[in-house]
């Protein structure tokens, strides 16, 4: 696995969410590694780019990622 930048890791997660979560677990691991390398504590996502851009979808995403050690916040 190559070391992805934080932005590349987030883009891969957007692509995975659009593709019915294909490869999502691997992308979360890559995101977590990129966050550690860059000293980032929270991953910021744009709600408009999510497959389910509603409160329930955002809360589900936050819970899913939190179980895997990634804190998710959403851009305003």
Image: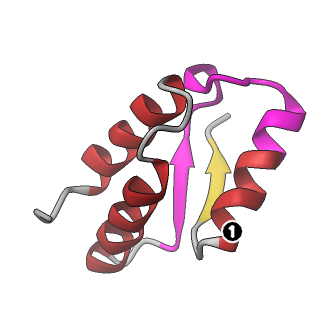
Label 1: which residue? 66
Residue shown at 25%/45% (left/top)?
Answer: 8
Q: Is residue 56 magenta?
A: yes
Q: Residue at x 32, y 50 (%)?
A: 9
- Residue 42, quarter of picture: bottom right
Above/below status of 63 relative to 69: above
Residue 15 lies, with reference to residue 69, above or below; the image says above
Task: Judge left or right: residue 53 versus residue 59.
Answer: left
Provide residue 45's location: percent of width, then percent of height: 55, 41
Residue located at (51% from left, 74% from top): 41
60, above or below 22, in the image = below
Q: Nearer the viewer, residue 31 or 45?
A: 31
**In this picture, residue 71 sits left or right of residue 27:** right
Q: How many marks can you see?
A: 1
Q: Residue at x 21, y 56 (%)?
A: 5
Relative to the observer, which residue lies in front, 20 or 28? 20
What is the quadrant of the C terminus in the image?
top right
Taking 9 as reference, is 72 left or right? right
Residue 27 position by quadrant? bottom left
| Colour logic | secondary structure
Crowd tier of the residue under label 1, counting other residues whose Cα lies within 10 Å: few below 14, some 14–19, many 20 or above: few
- Give the percent coordinates (x, y) of residue 31: 38, 61
Image quarter hosting the N terminus? bottom left
Q: Is residue 14 magenta?
A: no
Q: Which residues are magenta?
A: 41-59
| Residue extending furthest toward the left | 2
Q: Position of residue 50 (x, y in %)?
A: 61, 27
Q: Position of residue 16 (x, y in %)?
A: 44, 35
Q: Secondary structure at mark 1?
A: helix
């Amino acid at each position: 696995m190559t070391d992805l930048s934080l932005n590349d890791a987030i883009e891969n997660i957007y692509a995975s969410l659009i593709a019915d979560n294909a490869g999502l677990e691997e992308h979360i691991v890559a995101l977590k590694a990129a966050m550690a390398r860059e000293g980032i504590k929270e991953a910021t996502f744009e709600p408009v780019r999510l497959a389910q851009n509603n409160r329930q979808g955002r809360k589900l995403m936050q819970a899913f990622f939190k179980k895997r050690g990634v804190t998710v916040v959403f851009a305003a």
